[in-house]
Amino acid sequence: MSGKRSSGLIAAWLLGASAIGLPGQGYAATAEAATDQVRARLVASVDAVHPGAEILLGVNQRIIPHWHTYWKNPGDSGLATTIAWQLPAGAAAGEILWPVPSRFTVGPVTNYAYADEVTLLSPVTVPKDVAPGGVFPVNATVKWLVCEETCIPQTVELAISLPVVSGPSEAGQGSPLIREAQASLPVASPWPVSVTYGQDAVTLKIRGKELKPERIAEVGFFADQWGRISHGAPQERFFDDDGISLKLKPGEDPAPGAVLSGVLVVTENSADGPVRRGFAVEASPAGAAAATAHEGEPELGLASALVLALLGGLVLNLMPCVFPVLSLKALHLLKQAEESRTRTRLHGLAYTAGVLLSFAALGGVLIFLKAGGSAVGWGFQFQSPLFVLATAYLMFVVGLSLSGLLELGGSAAGLGSSLAEKRGYSGSFFTGVLATVVAAPCTAPFMGAAIGYAVAQSPVVLLAVLLSLGFGLALPYLALSHWPLLQRHLPRPGAWMETVKQGLAFPMYATAAWLVWVLAQQAGSHVVAVALGGMVAIAFAAWTHQRTRWGSPAARRFGSGVAAVAVFSALAVGYTGVTGPLADVSAPAEASAGKNWEPYSAARLQALRAEGRPVFLNFTAAWCISCLVNEKVALSDGAVSEAFRKGGVTYLKGDWTNRDPEITAKLQEFGRSGVPLYIHYPAGKDSAPVILPQILTPEIVLGAISPAAEVANSNLTFIKE
């Protein structure tokens, strides 16, 4: 503790002791107690409690003119008010929720404190086993230091007893002082705030283009930890196009490099006069803030979008949803080991051409649908049950081919007799096509911002960004096929290749099975029988074809005819099954009962935001493997669920498996054209949303919601169930 602070405290206590000669005065074990300077009253947010309720208790202080009590960081001298609760067994009280303080300066000493009247709120949890019909007694020992020119330490005992009722409907409205106190609490900052530590100055940067000199009358910062900044030093402000910078003088314990927390107090000019508001701030050092900058910045340009798309395509190769693609590429690499360098390069070019033409076709569809007024985005084709069923059949056929049960010209991706005759390069080309198909339901980092930007631009720009994404997807294989040094590391051909080839069939079967599951989420469980029946028919067609292909001409014709009928039956029954009257395309992906989340709706989000509650949004889809992995690894983690519960965070999940205009509109609001998208709204009606990365870990989620959880505890969370 510094000399300045120590001397201030000692002086305050000596002055107080000399003034009264006793450590405290005013004692009453009732709801109210008074000293000569402060009248204190214990109030509650309810008239009665019920088992398991979370309520707010408040200590209201009415202070005589010219005197003040202190904030949690009292400044150069003084002591923060303390409340020691005595509650029934099983009940628990949280930390004090501090209203926005004011600055009091006497000579060289500056304090952060309250004058006239203040109510200090504390959240309290009522045990679940409390019996209705009884009472819930609350006692509090409250200590404060009240100062003018002299300081007086004072202690009072307060007590109330609240009836215990059976349910929240009987709880009543409680004291209006609680609601007034809630309005005086700081809310989450709507602006990103960062801090830069210099030798002679600590600079707080508040980014907000609406923060203009004509709008902002005053702005000041209260650090909530002693010594982080000089309490009494002038705080110079500088406006620029990007917001406001506050130049602060370092205190006696500045902690360079640490997060600077406190309350930013902004006084805005309005038609009704100046309006003073407080915002809770957790300012990270400027470097860290840049590292967590939001994706989807509106300033993204074409060059940046092209680079991000290229990086996204490269990373897409590593995503779990592209595992079948990797298996196809591995198979091609093995085959290339047998061939000349020129042929290997041509295989790489053919594969790249297949990828790029597929992306060009996808871009053409997007442009066509946009021109027709449809809101579309990445992966939108998987919202069609027909497309999902067709892709499942295709993956199954490829699996049969890799298993050696179906010979379509010897090419894993050669579909149809014409392709079989062209085998080699056409196989590489269609491997690229398949790579694009199976990569579509997955999203990699960097992709979201790039595609979100592209779908809002002209057709030429949209196509350019998609081609850049496709080139990124094809680039690793293209480089391997053209780089002799890498080719020398390829395994030598051998009999083991057939085993590897057959083994690679299983990712294809797994993909087909997963797509059938997606189909059930989209169109109901009955389509599982339709899809599996179709696969049996396709397998029968393959077996018939294989058994008769080396027979007599009549046998071959018979086999081909039976196979064609089987395939036609699979397609016809599949089409009818997913588009017929039994299909329920609006079926939800899963019920929310018993889950830690609620289904998303714009109305529900709006209501939560109006109450100032913290909200976590998860926009997902059954066909989005990245989404499923994130939910399994991060959002279902026990620590994350507990953090949601403790922070009062409402977890809303928006399912985009089928088309949903509300979710599409929300995605577009954040510059996105597909899922996943994770957004956290900190507590406070005007809090700024935070966009999380597309690949989550429990640590990322906890880091995003933890600061907000503290704010949530200082807001409305504890008023209601």
Image (spheres, rainbow, N blue to C red):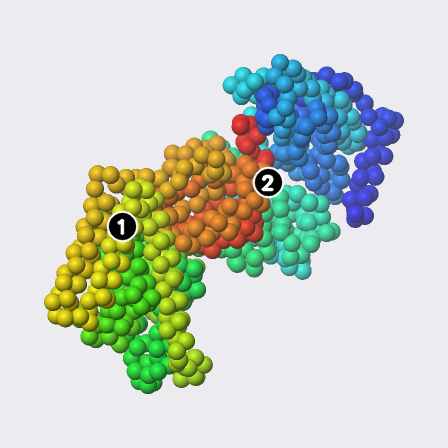
Give residue 415's mark: none
Tell me if residue 605 can be seen.
Answer: no
Q: Residues within 10 Å of mark 1 (few under 14, many from 20)?
A: some
Q: Nearer the viewer, residue 545 or 377?
A: 545
Residue type highlighted by circle 2 = Glu
Q: Position of residue 392 (x, y in %)?
A: 30, 55
Residue under label 1: 533
| The quarter of the displayed image where residue 521 is located | top left
Q: What's the residue at 29%, 42% (across, down)?
A: 526
From this view, report whether residue 107 is shown above or below residue 40.
below
Instruction: Say whether disc 2 or disc 1 marks the residue closer to the N-terminus.
Output: 1
Q: What's the residue at 38%, 66% (across, down)?
A: 504
Q: Residues within 10 Å of mark 2 (few under 14, many from 20)?
A: some
Residue under label 2: 710
| The quarter of the displayed image where residue 365 is located | bottom left
Question: In 3D space, how far apart are the residues under numbered discs 2 and 1 (Cα atoms)?
Answer: 54 Å
SS at mark 2? helix
Q: Nearer the viewer, residue 592 or 194?
A: 592
From this view, report whether residue 393 is shown above or below residue 668.
below
Residue type highlighted by circle 1 = Gly
Q: Relative to 599, is 25 on the left or the right?
A: right
Q: Relative to 350, is 683 on the left or the right?
A: right
From this view, report whether residue 350 is shown above or below residue 693.
below
